[in-house]
Structures are given as C-alpha cells and as structure tokens.
C-alpha cells in the first residue's frame, strides 16, 4: 500500500495541466498582446482569431491594433474573405476550408513579483499569404517596464547596505570598548 501512495505522489505532477489559470506564489500577471502589421496581402480579406481549445469566440483582428491571445487555449489566426460571414465558434467545416497560421510566439502571462515588466506587445508580419499558405513572422517586441519597481529594489538594497554598515560599526565599537 505504501508503494502505491509513493507512486501516486510521483505521478501527481503529470496530472496537473501544463498551463493553469492559477498564478503561482511569487508571481503576478502581465499583459501580452499581438499586433498584425497592415499588409497588401489583406486586400479583400480579413484575419480572424479563434481559440483552438476551451471557450472563447471569434475575434476580428484589425491590422495595426493590439489584440489578446492565449498560448494556453491555442489561439490560431485564419484568413477569411471580407464578404463571407464568420461563425461565432470554430466549426470543423469552416476550419477545413480556410488557411490558418500558428502564432510564432508564446504568451508571457506572468512574471516574478520583483520583475519590472508590465506589458509586452509583439508585432507580427504576414510573411506569406497565397492560395496554399498563411505564415506569420515576428517583427518586433516592445516590453514596457514599470520604473517604480526598479526604484523600490534600489531603495531596499540601499537600506540593507546601511543596515549592514550600522551593525558592523556597532560591533567594532563594542569590541573596542570591551
């Protein structure tokens, strides 16, 4: 019986989802968005984002404007004609008849508490769009940092340095007096 519980405890981490909705202790959420550059490839077409797994619906991607995505739910981008209607959820027949592109970057959804990172905006360019292929490439990534975190870390380091200096000075005085 003891071996059974040991085996169960050893296999328990495998049962946990790869990416959970729960933030781990010592971390905080950050915003990571994508922007698709305007392109001549999109004349008469539009890009539609669908989650591959889980819940969520259609999101029409406007070139040049940031939008949210999820690595956990596997957001995939599809090309559709301007004239056709887009379903509310991804239907197998619709998916099979449209070109799809994988997002070439993984979402950063959380960072350590001490990290100054606040948000990320990744710019994508349509590298290929023809009758058989739709591909995206990463062009740029802008990371916005909150400078007050850096100031707070410097203040804590300075306070620690002064505290150590004070303790060393006090010990030396006590050693000299004693």
Image: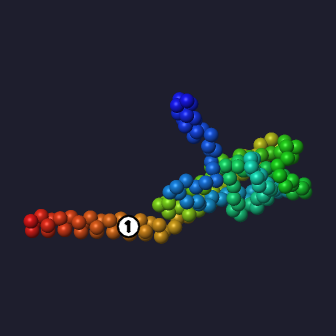
Q: In which quarter of the image is the C terminus?
A: bottom left
Q: Are there few (<14), some (14-19), or many (20+) residues within 10 Å of tag 1?
A: few
Residue drawn at point x = 23 percent, y = 66 percent: 167
State the image quarter where residue 18 is shown. top right
Give percent across and percent down for residue 127: 70, 48
Residue for point 52% across, 55% down = 25
At numbered mark 1, what does the secondary structure look like: helix, strand or loop? helix
The quarter of the picture where residue 14 lies is top right
Q: Position of residue 109 (x, y in %)?
A: 60, 55
Of residue 99 and residue 2, the one placed in the foreground of this image is: 2
Q: Judge left or right: residue 82 versus residue 116.
A: right
For the N terminus, the quadrant is: top right
Residue 122 falls left or right of residue 44: left
Q: In which quarter of the image is residue 155?
A: bottom left
**Residue 114 percent coordinates (x, y):** 47, 61
Residue receiving disc 1: 156
Q: Give the mark count.
A: 1
The reply to whether residue 128 is visible in this rendering is no
Looking at the image, residue 147 sits to the left or right of residue 158; the answer is right
The residue nearer to you, when weighing 126 against 14, is 14
Compared to residue 126, the image places residue 144 above or below, namely below
Relative to 105, is 7 above or below? above
Q: Which residue is drawn at 28% across and 68% down?
A: 162
Q: Can residue 28 be seen in this view?
A: yes
User: What percent of the width, then of the height, locates residue 141?
Assistant: 59, 57
In the image, 97 versus 72, the foreground residue is: 72
């Amino acid at each position: 019986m003891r071996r059974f519980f040991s085996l169960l405890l050893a296999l328990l981490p495998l049962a946990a989802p790869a990416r959970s909705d729960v933030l781990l202790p010592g971390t905080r959420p950050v915003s990571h968005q994508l922007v698709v550059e305007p392109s001549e490839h999109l004349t008469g077409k539009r890009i539609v984002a669908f989650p591959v797994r889980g819940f969520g619906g259609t999101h029409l991607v406007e070139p040049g404007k940031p939008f949210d995505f999820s690595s956990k739910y596997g957001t995939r981008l599809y090309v559709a004609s301007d004239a056709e209607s887009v379903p509310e959820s991804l239907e197998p027949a619709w998916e099979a008849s449209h070109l799809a592109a994988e997002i070439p970057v993984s979402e950063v959804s959380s960072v350590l508490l001490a990290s100054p990172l606040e948000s990320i905006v990744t710019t994508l360019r349509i590298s290929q769009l023809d009758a058989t292929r739709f591909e995206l490439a990463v062009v740029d990534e802008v990371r916005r940092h909150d400078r007050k975190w850096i100031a707070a870390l410097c203040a804590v380091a300075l306070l620690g340095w002064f505290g150590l200096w004070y303790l060393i000075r006090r010990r030396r005085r006590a050693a000299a007096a004693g």
